[in-house]
Image (cartoon, rainbow, N blue to C red):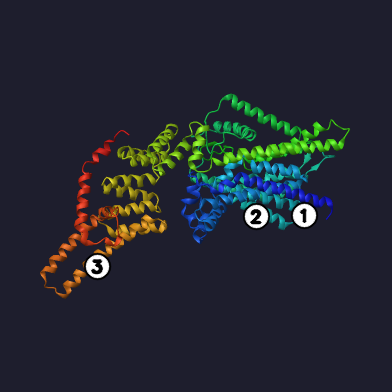
Amino acid sequence: MNFETTFNIRQNFVIGLFLIFATLFVYGPVRNYEFVNFDDPKYIYKNPHIQAGLTSESIIWSFTTTYAANWHPLTWLSHMVDVELFGMNPSGHHISNIIFHLANTLLLFFILWKMTGKPWRSGLVAGLFALHPLHVESVAWVSERKDVLSTFFFMLTIWEYIYYVNQPNIRRYIIVCIFFALGLMAKPMLVTLPFVLLLLDYWPLNRLKFKGHRLSTPKIPSSILVEKIPLFILSVASSIVTFMAQKSAGAVGSLDLLPLNARISNALVSYILYIGKMAWPFSLAVFYPHPQVFPTWQIAGSCLLLTSISLLVIWQMKKRFYLFVGWWWYVVTLIPAIGLVQVGRQAMADRYTYIPLIGLFIIITWGANDILAWLFRADHQNKFKHLRSFKTISTILILITLLSLSAISRKQVKYWTNSTALYEHALRITSNNYIVHYNLGNVLLSQDKFDKAIDHYKKALHNDPGSSETNNNLGLALAKKKKINAAIKHYFQALRIDPTWHEPHNNLGNVFASQGYLDQAIEHYLEALQLDPEFADAHNNLGLALMRKGNIIEAIAHFRKAQKIKPDDASATRNLNRAVSIKGKIDKAVANMYEAMQINPDDTNLHNKLDKLNMRKKELDEVIFFYQKALKPQPGYIEDALDIDNYAKVYRVKKDFYETLSRFTESKWKEGLDE
């Protein structure tokens, strides 16, 4: 091993060590953060398939489901692995995201260094990727595992492609295809990777043929295009599956809701806004509402800038290859998320820049090197002094840039401490942000801060009156405030907006059950179960209503169904145990009386006791709910106290309850009250 090789190893080791420590400095605090209630419930802590860990059923589910409007089985599997390792402790899930981000950073560094032979420039690109505030969302948000995981396979695909280019053979090419397929199974945004490989063929892999000399027009050999065909086939297949999954889940907005001209306008403006946020990474939010309409000057200006930059890089493509590659890397890899096919309700999102910004970082790094070299080229008298000054200035600028980004990113990371901090920050820097108002309302509702939750739900509805979710949750908050009629109004509004949604039916059932209208309650629980037979809460609530109607056997069946769907549901388990216990005690008492009659069948006294017992059995079934309601809050409550001998006490509780209930009438909630 010669001195130069040893120096390169040490140099790369220093760069790699800096990248590791800088990344951990920025993202280290995340390990103490909570889950947020934006997608995390859907992806992790309220998803029974994920909570089950790596079981045969959950693995099959991950490959067959289009839940969350996507087909990304590898992402589901990664969350299941986290559950196996860390349970529902958010710390471990956050650490996994950090590890993937760190691996992506190091892979990016080694890939660029291997292709260009420029360790410091490659290190700077990797440093910008690791520390830029626009990437905080992809790392600090556990639900964005698909970003860091898919990028991990994106990097591995390029890494293996480099080896394939240096030594083409079928084995290496198959590995390239496998890594690419795995990446698509983590997040389909990787569909543009074949185009990225074509760009890398141009520079820095230099696989294109030129007529005469390097500055002539490049010609793409047919073999280079042919070898990309299997990769393009994978891209097309992934695009079709993704579109179908998002379409079936209703995530793809129709042209009626968002016309094509609005989508094109948003795409043009977003390309420029992302560049602006890269240069000035402040006022970053978890959700940017779609403005629907853009000022003409903004559209025209964005179109002019994009055209000018594109013409410039084409003009310079024969001299400054990095401009062409970096710019089209940015433009092409952002296409799937630029909004031409509108998925979701956002205008743009920081997480969409995770891969695309690499192209701009390449332009910045290699461009800065060219500019500094040009500035120092004026001094030809002392080349040693010129080189030393160039390296000193370059090092200082690199450190200032990376340290500044680290400080800004670390501050941005703090906004992800919990849901409240995240949403309050977003509301400070955005306006008319109905999604954030809705999510913050959900947080406040879970904290029993009903008045504040109602306020945020109303603000969300002001800008988005057609939201069934907001109407439903506003109904929940109003019900907690005992504004029953207003709650019912919003539940029905939610059903008018989306008649196929099961949740409002369950909530209506709860309201009617709380007011004693058991028939109406049971009707809505059954409607909820017809829409979603696997709705555990509706099974549990229907069981309670049936118990109050005296149908213990049917109630037990629904409690068992709820328990099977959600094995960790303590409420369903508790209700099932109580119902079975009560039924067992009653059946045992009746059996004992029948046995006594068999011993002495002529005893009329026993006949009278049996008749009374059967009558009590029927009446007792009707008051089981009130029995539990009366006993549970008392100190020293024991489940075994559920005994037929306490019937008289239960009956008094039932009587008192109905006397209290009498002031509420069915006509009252039908007429509706002011909120």
Residue 303 appears left or right of 386: left
Picture residue at 62% right of the left edge, 52% below the top: 181
Is residue 527 visible from the viewing direction of this image? yes
Answer with mark 3 or mark 2, whichever residue precedes in sequence: 2
Cα–Cα span, label 3 and label 2: 64 Å
* Residue 47 x, y percent position in the rendering: 47, 52
Which residue carries the number 3 mark? 588
Answer with mark 1 or mark 2, whichever residue precedes in sequence: 1
- The type of residue carrying mark 2 is Ile
In this picture, is 420 found above or below 553? above
Image mark count: 3
In the rendered image, the quadrant that contains the C terminus is top left
| Label 1 crowd bin: few (<14), some (14–19), many (20+), radius 10 Å | few
Quarter-of-image position of residue 611: bottom left
- The type of residue carrying mark 3 is Lys
Q: Kindly indicate whether the residue at mark 1 contacts the one at mark 3 (C-beta within 8 angstroms).
A: no
Which label lies toward us, 3 or 2? 3
The residue tagged with tag 1: helix, strand or loop? loop
The residue tagged with tag 2: helix, strand or loop? helix
Cα–Cα span, label 3 and label 1: 80 Å
Which residue carries the number 2 mark? 178
Which residue carries the number 1 mark? 167
Q: Kindly indicate whether the residue at mark 2 contacts the one at mark 1 (C-beta within 8 angstroms).
A: no
* Residue 352 x, y percent position in the rendering: 59, 41
